[in-house]
Image: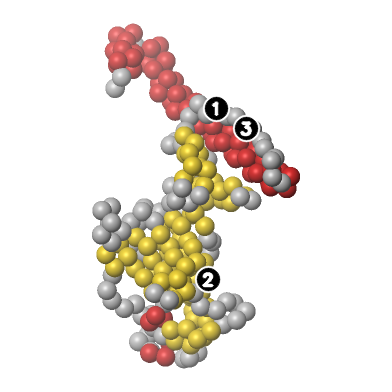
Amino acid sequence: MSKGVSEIATMALYVGVAMTAVSASLSIGVPVIENMQDGASVQKAQSFMNQIDSSIAEVVSEGEGSTRTLSTDFDKGILYFDNSTNSLVYEIETNAEVISPQTSRKTGNIVMSSNADVSVTETTVNGTDCYMMENKYLKSCIRNIGSSSNQKPINTSNLLVLYEFKNSEGANKQLDGNLTVELNGIESTRYGTGYTQPEDTGEFIGTGEIVATVASDYGFTYDIYFRLPTGSDLMRIDVQNYR
């Protein structure tokens, strides 16, 4: 407790009801005001990012020698360039409900997110095309197979291409083992035709999600959801939508 707040509380004990009411309004009002200020800072950052995006498009269209100068001043938060994602980032820590936790929203080239550090990209691991989901703690790659309009042979036993725990010292550890999905212990439900696709790709995603649709040789069709949330040290696997 800060000295100022301590003095108010002590005065409230001596003065009684009137001072208690003042103390209550301070404790409730200050967070609300701070949240409003944080919300305004986020809106200001969004506006600035839109200006940058628009200016970049204009400079590109005008050709060599074209320039733009923009200036801004944020009372809260930090603005920096993230080399790993090739992105200009505005970051603020707040309790304001600007956007739901572990979600992201993309408008044009601007991504707005809250507690969202998952990236989903198309890549190749040991010669196998796959969708890589990665957060602070692990990365997982799910085989890239076909599309909804061009289904290919699929086998749940080889969907998981990579599952690797990340180490801050660089000594990553890959999981040794096999993943197989089958229904009611029937082996022919493991394979058939189908495809995989990501819910979204890019950076600053709240929860990475890759869906494998399997039309099994047994006759069942179902979806396997591979999900990697922000801050999680494990991947969730759910089987849904039997048909």
Mark 3: give few (<14), some (14-19) or many (20+) Cα within 10 Å: few
Q: In this rendering, is residue 22 above or below 133?
A: above
N-term-proximal mark, 2 vs 3:
3
Q: In this rendering, is residue 23 above or below 233?
A: above
Identify the element where label 3 is drawn.
loop
Q: Residue at x 50, y 49 (%)?
A: 86
Q: Looking at the image, is mark 2 or mark 1 nearer the viewer?
A: 1
Give the distance between the C-alpha atoms of the residues marked 2 and 3, in whole angstroms: 39 Å
Give the distance between the C-alpha atoms of the residues marked 2 and 1, in whole angstroms: 41 Å
Label annotation for residue 73? 1
> Most extreme residue toward the top, as rendered?
15
- The amino acid sitting under disc 3 is Leu
- The amino acid sitting under disc 2 is Gln
- The amino acid sitting under disc 1 is Asp
N-term-proximal mark, 2 vs 1:
1
Quadrant holding the N terminus: top left
Q: Which residue is mark 3?
A: 70
Task: Give the percent coordinates (x, y) of residue 72.
Answer: 58, 29
Task: Give the percent coordinates (x, y) of residue 243.
Answer: 52, 81
Identify the element where label 2 is drawn.
strand
Identify the element where label 1 is drawn.
loop
**Res 72 seen here:** yes
Q: Count the numbered circles shown.
A: 3
Task: Give the percent coordinates (x, y) of residue 54.
Answer: 68, 42
Q: Residue at x 59, y 47 (%)?
A: 110
Q: Residue at x 44, y 28 (%)?
A: 31
Label annotation for residue 13? none
